[in-house]
Image: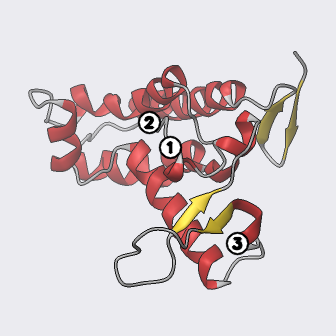
Amino acid sequence: MAAYSYKGVVVSSDTKSCQQCIQAYSKASRILAMINRTITYKSSENLVRLYKSLVRPHLEYCTAAWSPHYVKDKVLIEKIQTIYKNDSGTENLQYEDRLRELNLWILKDRRVHADLIEVSKIVRGLSSTKLEAFFELDNKGISRGHQWKLKKKWCNTDLRQHFINTFSRRG
């Protein structure tokens, strides 16, 4: 299977994002290892700042194009945030409680939030992407007081189906 890189995003011939997830995980884990080797005072504030500025950009770069939709890829990407378990003083907390304590979001939730922002821009005409390219207005159902009930167009490729994961049934 051939893969090529375009503007930092690895695209395989079958349009799956597995290689990009591996690359993002690899870059992020190398940076976390560098942080662990070089930072001596590991307070939670310092680690969170370093994580947000040095690590998370690699995990979120261009996610509209490669957002993971297979469970194995989601687990791989989310695995990065578990680094705080041993170094931040929150090692006795469960994963979700630890993230809440450190004021971090689960990465899947951040991707969904970014997708919602992008859809909002498309609907309002603030994006170069046309609404008709991905959505149809659903005039059949109740729209809770507004006219923007969207229906995702049918598609037959994984790339198109998972491009905006917010509206995907697989989640």
Amino acid bearing label 1? Val
Q: Is residue 66 visible?
A: no
Residue lying farthest to the left in this orientation: 92
Closer to the camera, 47 or 78?
78
Distance of label 2 from label 1 (alpha carbons): 10 Å
Closer to the camera, 7 or 65?
65
Give percent across and percent down for residue 167. 52, 52
- In the picture, measured across the screen, residue 136 lies left or right of residue 95, that is right
Reply above or below: 117 against 68. Answer: below
Q: Return the residue at label 1.
A: 55
Reply above or below: 137 against 9. Answer: below
Label 1 near label 2: C-beta < 8 Å?
Answer: yes
- Disc 3 crowd rating (10 Å Cα; few below 14, some 14-19, many 20+) is some
Q: Is residue 160 visible?
A: yes
Amino acid bearing label 2? Ile
Q: Return the residue at label 3.
A: 131
**The N terminus: image quadrant:** top right
- In the picture, measured across the screen, residue 64 lies left or right of residue 69, that is right
Distance of label 2 from label 3 (alpha carbons): 42 Å
Which of marks 1 and 2 precedes in the sequence? 2
Give percent across and percent down for residue 123. 61, 77
Q: Residue at x 55, y 67 (%)?
A: 150
| SS label for mark 3 | helix
- Disc 2 crowd rating (10 Å Cα; few below 14, some 14-19, many 20+) is some
Q: How many marks?
A: 3
Q: Return the residue at label 2.
A: 35
Which of marks 3 and 2 precedes in the sequence? 2
Give percent across and percent down for residue 149. 50, 71
The quarter holding residue 90 reads top left
- In the picture, measured across the screen, residue 22 lies left or right of residue 42, that is right
